[in-house]
Amino acid sequence: MRQKPTSKPSRWHFLVLLLGLGWGLLQVVTASVPVETRVQAVLVWGTAESKPAGKNLKEVDVKLREKLGKIFKWQNYFEVNRKTAGVTASKPQTVKLSEECSVDIKILPENMAEVKLIGKGKTIVTRRHSLAKPDALVLAGDDKNNTAWFVVLNFN
């Protein structure tokens, strides 16, 4: 004898439905939670001269000095300012490092950051940087009297 189909859902149907709803809710919640990326921005001044008297500058750490010294010609690198900011995909940040220098940082899809270096109110350069890379992003430009400035960005 053939059984008549029941109109009541079984416990398995209920369990599968519950798991499906739970998974969907988890996807919505995790998609809406912004993941913050911490950015440390350091404004550095490079020169062949010694530290100017009366300036509140400190030498950069040995590791950064060696890294910059392998690429650039200056013998001395001084930290002018250091700031840290939190950036999410929905909340870009502008980090002001001096009266004339700031960086706009935006988190992009696929684990990328877009950085705009602003000097004297104008965009100097725009770069994209993979957040998967452990290396710092270094942006640079010439200054007066055969010196240069650098913005060193570390993401974590």
Image (tube, rainbow, N blue to C red):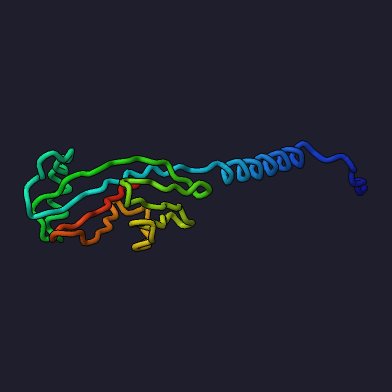
Residue 20 sits in quarter:
top right
Seen at 32% across and 43% down, the residue is: 40
Q: Nearer the viewer, residue 120 or 94?
A: 120
Seen at 34% across and 47% down, the residue is: 155
Farthest residue to the front: give it. Answer: 54
Tell me: 94 left or right of 74: right
Measuring from the top left, give residue 114's x and y in whole percent. 41, 57
Measuring from the top left, give residue 27's x and y in whole percent. 61, 45
Tell me: 133 left or right of 150: right
Quadrant the C terminus occupies? top left
Seen at 27% across and 51% down, the residue is: 152
Tell me: 43 left or right of 121: left
Measuring from the top left, give residue 110's x and y in whole percent. 46, 57
- Number of numbered discs present? 0
Q: Nearer the viewer, residue 21 or 111?
A: 111
Seen at 16% across and 40% down, the residue is: 55
Q: Nearer the viewer, residue 14 or 86?
A: 86
Tell me: 143 left or right of 128: left
Farthest residue to the top: give it. Answer: 11
Measuring from the top left, give residue 73's x and y in whole percent. 10, 60
